[in-house]
Image (cartoon, helix red, strand yellow):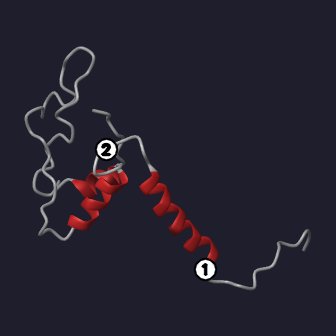
Amino acid sequence: QNPKMMLHTDICLFYDLDANSNCCTRTDLFRTDGESHCPTQKDNQCITYGGDHPRWEASEAVIEYLGAPHVEDDNENFYEAFRRAWFKATMNGMGDLKPVADSC
């Protein structure tokens, strides 16, 4: 299994921390000494949102951007969505923009 880094926002969108904030997101990870990545919560895997929860779609998006259906080293889904959002943020709106003047 190839571990992925998740931002705090990803974790909050994917795991139902309101149900149990005293949990571990990766009970399957171990340090080089064989000790659990989550020594105090090694048997308490955080639960994910169910299909009837309002955050379900956000949880599904996290899976998609991880490279679903198989978690891979492929960020193409994220980059494509970011490209579309960046285009909207930088190209929409003002149509009569002018270059910055050399002096005032």
Instruction: Name the residue carrying label 1.
Output: 92
Instruction: Name the residue carrying label 2.
Output: 71
Instruction: Find residue 55 and report its horizontal and vertical position in percent.
Output: 22, 66
Tag 2–tag 1 contact (CB < 8 Å): no
Q: Residue furthest right?
A: 103
Q: Residue furthest front?
A: 69
Amino acid type, label 1: Asn
- The image shows residue 32, relative to residue 2, as above or below, that is above
Quadrant where the N terminus lies? top left
Alpha-carbon span between mark 2 and mark 1: 33 Å
Nearer the observer, 20 or 27 = 27
Q: Residues within 10 Å of mark 1 (few under 14, many from 20)?
A: few
In front: label 2 or label 1: 2
Location of residue 22 (image quadrant): top left
The tag earlier along the polypeptide, 2 or 1, is: 2
Report the disc number at residue 43. none
